[in-house]
Image: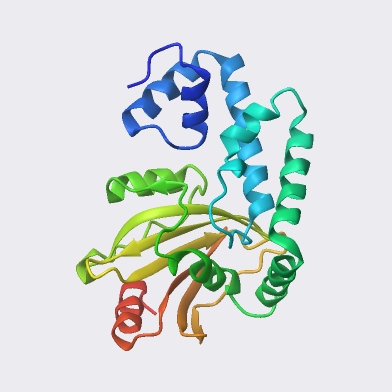
């Protein structure tokens, strides 16, 4: 449990969503009465979003402790936030190399041609890994919805797949050409995974009709509402596809 006033470590944990929900609520109330500290926390959160934008969908390398956002902020806290984002981007460019850059470019080009290609790419990068790097690990389904509501207002509620044995377990924030996105990972007791993906339709408000498509062993069911595009992605499987179509009323 944190103590007030919070330490810098507590504030970094707050920005990185590492605090228990009770501590987060306590710190929310405290920040509401300390606008100067709240402004600093807001700046740190903006730094984290810039880092995620730089990382994007190219995190195909093993976890590197040197790229932890909190450590980068501590090392570069005397430099401007713009320098921080630039340094992180350059470091990624050197470490990941030209091949990954070309792969990211191909994925971006594909996303402009096929509906919700970015949702399927996110599933390949994260859901098919044994351990998904996550920005949030669920405690219960209500907590996951609260976490998602912080970033996507007036969006559809998370689909309830519990009758089929799937429950949300973790989530990750992502960056796309259209804006910030998120992938929520569902899992059943057998370890099978389904992802819920949400992002804005972009500056041209490109909304999608209800539809589905498959590619490379994955099936995507996609649709839109005012303000957001959505997709449910899973391995191609007749029973899973039927369950999703019934749940999403396709």
Residue 118 occupies quadrant: bottom right
Please tell me which residue is depicted at 20% across the width and 68% down the height of the picture.
Answer: 163
Please tell me which residue is depicted at 29% across the width and 45% down the height of the picture.
Answer: 139
Task: Look at the picture and state if 139 lies above or below 205.
Answer: above
Horizontal arrangement in the rendering, residue 101 relative to residue 17 (left or right): right
Q: Residue furthest bottom?
A: 238
In the picture, the quarter occupied by the N terminus is top left
Please tell me which residue is depicted at 47% across the width and 31% down the height of the picture.
Answer: 13
Horizontal arrangement in the rendering, residue 111 relative to residue 68 (left or right): right
Task: Look at the picture and state if 195 lies above or below 134.
Answer: below
In the picture, the quarter occupied by the C terminus is bottom left
Task: Look at the picture and state if 102 lies above or below 40.
Answer: below
Residue 209 at least partly seen = yes
Horizontal arrangement in the rendering, residue 176 relative to residue 148 (left or right): right
Please tell me which residue is depicted at 62% across the width and 43% down the height of the picture.
Answer: 49
Along the line of sight, the residue nearer the viewer: 213 or 88: 88
Residue 57 occupies quadrant: bottom right
Number of marks drawn: 0
Residue 127 location in percent, x, y?
Answer: 44, 66
Along the line of sight, the residue nearer the viewer: 219 or 225: 219
Residue 43 at least partly seen = no
């Amino acid at each position: 449990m944190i103590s007030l006033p919070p330490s810098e470590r507590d504030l970094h944990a707050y920005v990185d969503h590492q605090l228990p929900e009770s501590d987060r609520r306590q710190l929310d109330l405290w920040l509401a009465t300390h606008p100067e500290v709240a402004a600093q926390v807001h700046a740190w959160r903006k730094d984290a979003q810039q880092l995620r934008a730089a990382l994007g969908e190219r995190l195909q390398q093993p976890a590197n402790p040197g790229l932890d956002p909190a450590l980068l902020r501590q090392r570069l806290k005397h430099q401007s936030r713009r320098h921080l984002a630039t340094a992180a981007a350059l470091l990624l460019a050197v470490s990941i190399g030209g091949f990954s850059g070309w792969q990211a470019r191909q994925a971006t080009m594909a996303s402009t041609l096929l509906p919700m290609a970015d949702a399927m790419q996110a599933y390949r990068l994260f859901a098919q890994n044994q351990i998904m790097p996550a920005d949030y690990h669920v405690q219960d389904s209500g907590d996951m919805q609260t976490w998602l509501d912080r970033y996507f207002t007036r969006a559809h509620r998370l689909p309830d797949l519990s009758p089929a044995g799937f429950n949300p377990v973790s989530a990750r924030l992502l960056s796309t050409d259209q804006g910030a996105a998120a992938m929520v990972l569902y899992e059943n007791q057998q370890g099978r995974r389904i992802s819920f993906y949400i992002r804005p339709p972009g500056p041209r408000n490109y909304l999608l009709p209800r539809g589905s498509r498959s590619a490379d062993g994955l099936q995507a069911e996609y649709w839109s509402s005012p303000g957001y595009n959505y997709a449910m992605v899973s391995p191609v499987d007749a029973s899973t596809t039927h369950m999703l179509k019934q749940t999403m009323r396709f």
